Amino acid sequence: MIELTVDGTPLQAPAGQSLAAVLITAGQTVLRSSPSGTPRGLFCGIGVCQECRVVVDGVVTRACVTPAVAGMTVTTGRT
Ligand code: FES
């Protein structure tokens, strides 16, 4: 198990699991909001649609193709 921070909250997860799986397991199915306020989250799951964008250590990242790494800081765009 590793520990990462999601929106300021510490979270434990299996090392190497996709960040999207970590977030969904933690109950966070909405990862960001569209400009119109529509909730967005995992859609394709293979890195194509970019609906799962979150910010990891200051860089916009697709959660579905990013492995969870110890110490990473994740910011979702949920409003
Ligand atoms: S869910 Fe489509 S790129 Fe991540």
Image (cartoon, grey):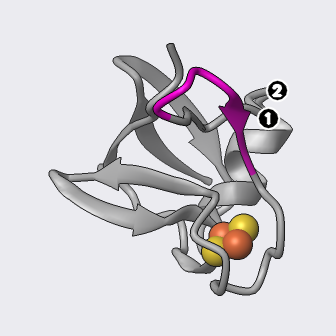
Task: Name the magenta segment's main secondary structure.
Answer: loop
Residue 10, given in percent of the width and then of the height, sits at: 45, 24
- Name the residue beneath numbered marker 2: 27
* Left or right: 38 in relation to 60: right
- What residue do we see at 68% from left, 27% from top? 38
Q: How many C-alpha atoms fall within 10 Å of the one at disc 2: few (<14), some, or many (≥20)?
A: few
CB contact under 8 Å: marks 2 and 1: yes
Q: Amino acid at mark 1?
A: Thr
Q: Is residue 17 visible?
A: no
Give the residues in magenta: 35-41
Identify the element where label 2 is drawn. Answer: loop
Residue 46 at least partly seen: yes
Above or below, 10 relative to 35:
above
21 w.r.t. 74: above or below: below
From what the image shows, is residue 61 above or below residue 53?
A: below
The N terminus sits in image quarter: bottom right
Amino acid type of the residue that numbered disc 2 sits on in the rendered structure:
Gly
**Mark 1 Cα-neighbour bin, 10 Å: few <14, some 14–19, many ≥20:** some
Alpha carbons under labels 2 and 1: distance apart? 6 Å
Residue 66 percent location from the top left of the image: 52, 75
Residue sitting nearer the eye, 34 or 41:
34
State the image quarter where residue 37 is shown. top right
Residue of label 1: 29
Residue, x 44% and y 31% (percent of image)?
A: 77
Label 2 vs label 1, nearer the camera: 1
